[in-house]
Amino acid sequence: MSLPAVTVVIPVFNEEAVLPELCRRLTALFDTQPDCRWSAVLVDDGSRDGSAAFIRAGAAKDPRFQLVELSRNFGFQAALAAGLAQARGSDAIVTMDADLQDPPEVIPQLVAAWRGGAEVVRAKRRSRAERGLRRAGFDLFHLLYGRLTDYPVEPDSGTFGLLGGAAIAAFSQLPERHRFFPGLRAWIGFPTADVLYDRQERAAGETQQTFRRLVRYALDGLFSFSHLPLRALTYAGIFIAFMGFAAAAFYAVRRLLDIETAPTGYTTLVTVVLFLGGVQLIGIGVLGEYLGRVYDEVKRRPNYIVKSPGTRGVGAEKNPARD
Ligand code: UDP
Ligand code: MG
């Protein structure tokens, strides 16, 4: 029986400072684990430093390393999709960050869990490094996400993990543009295993995920996996209409019984008008979130464009077999 081909897919954006260490540790891993045919796909997501050049030089020396170069910065999710498309022929794909927050030394455990029968393996943090506002944001997101969707994600696992052959095939059938990887991974199903690990500090450099990006990512997660915000609007509308009827009935009865009310009510009027205006604007905003996403999907623009020669040209998700 031939050895399984395992590809490590890593999105890279301005990671010049950590790449030497990353490649050194990956090479060490590949050399000491002869029970797989290892390779690594590093997707350069439009870095403005020497990342692409470094990977290209490394790939020239060691054919197990491959560079996929995107034409500009498309964002982490798109870069990941590009890597998954490139590695599609593998028996298993390991997905991880470049910054060594996900230690490569955990990969053999992921592979072991996969060999033990799991099709999806999630690396689960024993502890989270984030503190303060970020931490509060993550907690709030997971609380909302868990309530709103039918496919809750494991709060302590991120991108780091492994996809087996069937999961890779399932992923390649997901055509959407707004991607939330942990949500999609939960959505595809399959027997899933968790491997515990200690998340490290970033080896060097600064986080590339700004707070704004994280918020956008969180909204993508919520809106692509839940229609509940729309339904909540319907319920709010029904509730408010009901209150309106009740108030109308109340005043009508008073008028019929000749209980005359003094012409007060300016404050009430203003409050009600403002309240309803606010509710309607929120409603339009929520509709807009969905509509914008529908618009992005129907345009069918690819998620990313590959610039380097020797790799497939465009990131359309429905692709023929690997070259
Ligand atoms: N990354 C990317 N494109 C981007 C931003 C980030 O490919 O536009 C990569 C980055 O190089 C790293 C991974 O995505 O390998 C995670 O990014 P980062 O460490 O900045 O995020 P955090 O760990 O803080 O969530
Ligand atoms: Mg990181």
Image: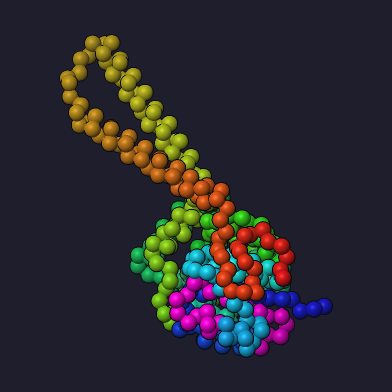
Q: How many numbered tags mark residues here?
A: 0
Residue for point 43% across, 71% down: 208
Residue for point 57% across, 71% down: 307
Q: In which quarter of the image is residue 186?
A: bottom right
Q: Is residue 299 left or right of residue 254?
A: right
User: Residue 106 in the image: x percent, y percent?
Assistant: 59, 79
For residue 43: magenta?
A: yes
Query: Front-most of 57 and 269?
Result: 57
User: Residue 224 in the image: x percent, y percent?
Assistant: 53, 51
Q: In which quarter of the image is residue 192?
A: bottom right
User: Residue 272 in the image: x percent, y percent?
Assistant: 28, 32
Q: Is residue 67 left or right of residue 136?
A: right
- In the image, residue 7 sits, relative to residue 238, either above or below, namely below
Residue for point 45% across, 36% down: 235
Residue 176 visible in the picture: yes
Residue 160 visible in the picture: no
Query: Front-most of 281 and 196?
Result: 281
Q: Is residue 111 left or right of residue 156?
A: right
Q: What stretch is highlighted in magenta?
A: 31-55
Q: Is residue 31 left or right of residue 70?
A: right
Q: Which quarter shows the C terminus?
A: bottom right
Q: Which quarter shows the N terminus?
A: bottom right
- In the image, residue 286 sits, relative to residue 113, either above or below, namely above
